[in-house]
Image (cartoon, rainbow, N blue to C red):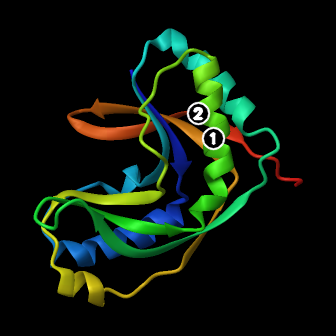
């Protein structure tokens, strides 16, 4: 199983970002992510044995202890890498409030003996891969301020269903709403 832990986005936020992506497709070519797969990755675990799923759930439950809900804002589109072969994404503002959760999650996974991608957490929502960035169009794109309250983290299974890549939620660990 190919797994990762992230933040699922509510339907209304995914729809707004999807409308933005539709506008961007007209001026920035690339391999666009389907709207239903929009999310914020915390930790990419990768290929994992089915037997490790309960261990990952335990690590997630441990990581959210004492975590208050976090308010984020989805900002403007930007990119990683070179403009001719970029990852187009939506910026996420306020994500540094999640650094403690990320640290606890990675620590809990290590304590359980699980391996994962060590890339540092940098919250974003991927819109397209292999994008050819037009800086003029990107700079002129209106900045959004979609508000998002994070009150749980989700274990996703990345799989193909009828040839289509899908990120299926298989477990959720909630943060402390009474904080």
Left/right of residue 51 with respect to residue 66 in the rendered view = left
Q: Which residue is mark 2?
A: 106
33 or 100: nearer the eye? Answer: 100
Q: Position of residue 71 (x, y in %)?
A: 67, 66
Q: Report whether residue 54 is seen.
A: yes
Cβ–Cβ under 8 Å for marks 2 and 1: yes
**Residue 26 image-quadrant placement:** bottom left
Q: Position of residue 104 (x, y in %)?
A: 67, 37
- Compared to residue 99, the image places residue 164 above or below, namely above
Left/right of residue 25 with respect to residue 158 in the rendered view = left
- Compared to residue 124, the image places residue 7 above or below, namely above
Query: Residue at the right extreme?
Result: 178
- As measured in the structure, the alpha-carbon distance from the residue carrying label 2 to the one carrying label 1 is 5 Å
12 or 17: nearer the eye? Answer: 17
Q: Secondary structure at mark 1?
A: helix
Q: Position of residue 131 (x, y in %)?
A: 16, 63
């Amino acid at each position: 199983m190919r797994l990762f832990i992230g933040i699922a986005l509510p339907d209304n936020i995914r729809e707004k970002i999807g409308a933005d992506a539709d506008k961007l497709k007209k001026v920035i070519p690339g391999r666009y992510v389907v709207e239903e797969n929009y999310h914020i990755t915390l930790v990419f675990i990768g290929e994992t044995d089915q037997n490790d799923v309960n261990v990952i759930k335990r690590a997630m439950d441990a990581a959210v202890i004492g975590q208050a809900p976090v308010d984020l804002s989805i900002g403007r589109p930007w990119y990683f890498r070179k403009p001719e072969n970029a990852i187009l994404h939506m910026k996420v503002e306020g994500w540094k409030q999640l650094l403690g959760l990320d640290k606890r999650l990675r620590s809990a996974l290590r304590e359980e003996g699980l391996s994962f991608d060590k890339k540092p957490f940098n919250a974003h929502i991927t819109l397209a891969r292999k994008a050819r960035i037009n800086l003029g169009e990107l700079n002129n794109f209106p900045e959004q301020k979609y508000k998002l309250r994070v009150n749980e983290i989700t274990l996703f299974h990345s799989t193909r269903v009828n040839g289509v890549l899908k990120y299926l939620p298989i477990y959720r660990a909630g943060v402390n709403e009474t904080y």
